[in-house]
Image (cartoon, rainbow, N blue to C red):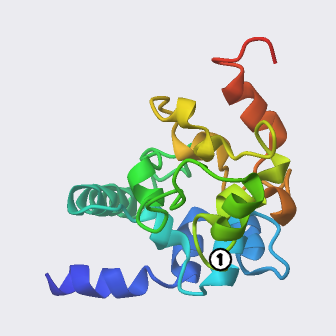
């Protein structure tokens, strides 16, 4: 048990993660100013947000699974048989994103003038700012998340919000248009 407590403390140090996972480039972007990817933007807003915040598991079952995979990888490393995976063995789930991003939108469906909705949505630090900042996506300046017809659609957060890519910028909320268009075309074939 003491080992797990020590591990939980150590893994909060991003350099500890990078020492095994060899993600020096991603770590550089995490701490860069200005941020050049979504992970860096999160870290800029809160320096405590690092690798483990997203990759540590949002619930006890996933947390234990992450530790089990890490333990197995450590044994393989010590035996000289470890290879850095080319993809994540434990893909991020929406639960990891929703640790901080719940609800996605706090503003209900617009009933008044659009400017009134944007004024209510634009409170600094409020997740509902998505609705106000979404002039770069969707139809008529409306965020994907604000379009109620999308409520039953299940698209994993990380399909659009690619955290470690650099093909977007803060003005576009680090959402790659090419990635999003591919996801949208799954339903909207006329795009």
**Above or below: residue 95 compared with residue 180:** below
Please state which of residues 56 and 157 is positioned toward the viewer in this rendering: 157
Horizontal placement of 66 versus 155: left or right?
left
Q: Residue furthest front?
A: 112
Asked if residue 178 is positioned above or below residue 158 in the image, the reply reads above
For the N terminus, the image quarter is bottom left
Query: Tag 1's secondary structure?
Result: loop
User: Residue extending furthest top?
Assistant: 190
Q: Where is residue 53 in the image (x, y as percent from the top left)?
A: 47, 71
Front position in the image: 94 or 119: 119
Mark count: 1
Using the image, determine if residue 115 lies above or below residue 87.
Answer: below
Residue 26 horizontal/vertical position (percent): 71, 66
Q: Residues within 10 Å of mark 1 (few under 14, many from 20)?
A: few
**Residue sitting at 54 percent across and 70 percent down?**
51
Q: Mark 1 points at which residue?
A: 123
How far across and how far down the image is residue 84, in percent? 56, 52
In the image, is 70 to the left or to the right of 101? Answer: left
Q: Residue at x 82, y 65 (%)?
A: 170
Say which quarter of the image contains residue 188. top right
Q: In which quarter of the image is the C terminus?
A: top right
- Left/right placement of residue 184 relative to residue 34 reads left
Q: Residue drawn at (51%, 53%), measured in percent from left and top? A: 108
Q: Residue at x 71, y 72 (%)?
A: 41
Q: Can residue 94 be seen in this view?
A: yes
Front-most of residues 8 and 35? 35
Judge whether residue 86 can be spotted in this image: no
Question: 142 or 103, which lies in front?
Answer: 142
Residue 39 placement (x, y as % from top left): 66, 67
């Amino acid at each position: 048990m003491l080992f797990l407590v020590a591990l939980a403390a150590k893994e909060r140090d991003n350099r500890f993660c990078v020492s095994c996972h060899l993600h020096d480039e991603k770590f550089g972007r995490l701490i860069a100013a200005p941020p050049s990817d979504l992970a860096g933007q999160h870290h800029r807003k809160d320096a405590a947000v690092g690798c483990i915040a997203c990759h540590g598991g949002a619930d006890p079952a996933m947390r234990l699974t992450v530790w089990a995979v890490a333990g197995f990888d450590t044994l393989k490393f010590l035996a000289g048989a470890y290879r850095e995976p080319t993809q994540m063995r434990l893909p991020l789930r929406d639960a990891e994103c929703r640790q901080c991003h719940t609800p996605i939108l706090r503003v209900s469906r617009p009933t008044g003038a659009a400017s009134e909705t944007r004024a209510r949505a634009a409170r600094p630090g409020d997740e509902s700012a998505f609705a106000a900042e979404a002039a770069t996506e969707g139809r008529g300046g409306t965020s994907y998340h604000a379009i109620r017809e999308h409520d039953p659609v299940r698209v994993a957060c990380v399909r659009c919000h690619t955290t470690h890519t650099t093909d977007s910028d803060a003005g576009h909320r680090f959402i790659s248009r090419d990635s999003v268009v591919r996801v949208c075309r799954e339903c909207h074939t006329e795009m």
